[in-house]
Image (cartoon, rainbow, N blue to C red):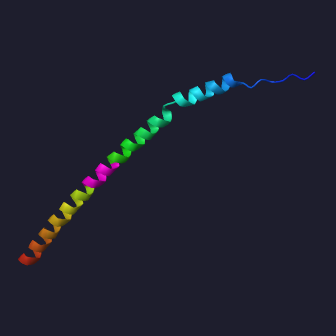
Amino acid sequence: MKLEQKPRQGINVRIIGKLTSDQRGATAIEYGLICALIVLAIMGGVQLFASKAIGMLNHVATQVNDAG
């Protein structure tokens, strides 16, 4: 006598429900995007500072060469 097994749809529905309600991946992606924006802002600030600093040092070097 062979018993037929019924598909376990209740378990599959529960698993799908858990996967759709899980927010950990979305939160990690949001934090990643925030970090990326912060890094871009820092890079822009450093680039702006570097160009200003190079200009200032070139001006000082020119003044020293002209005075000497």
- Give the magenta part as a residue range: 39-45
Question: Which residue is nearer to you in this view: 33 or 55?
Answer: 33
Residue at screen point 77% across, 23% down: 6
> Where residue 64 sits: x, y (%)?
10, 73
Residue 44 inside the magenta-drawn segment: yes
Q: Position of residue 22 (x, y in %)?
A: 52, 30
Q: Is residue 47 left or right of residue 21?
A: left
> Which residue is at the far left?
67
Question: Residue shown at 29%/50% (left/top)?
Answer: 42
Most extreme residue toward the right, as rendered? 1
Q: Which one is in front, 10 or 51?
A: 10
- The quadrant in which the C terminus is found is bottom left
Q: Could you tell me how many numbered marks the image carries?
A: 0
Q: Is residue 42 magenta?
A: yes
The one nearer the camera, 3 or 48, is 3
- Image quadrant holding the N terminus, namely top right
x, y percentage for residue 31? 41, 39
Classify 25 as above or below 53.
Answer: above
Q: Main secondary structure of the magenta part?
A: helix
Question: Seen in the image, is 63 located left or right of residue 7?
Answer: left
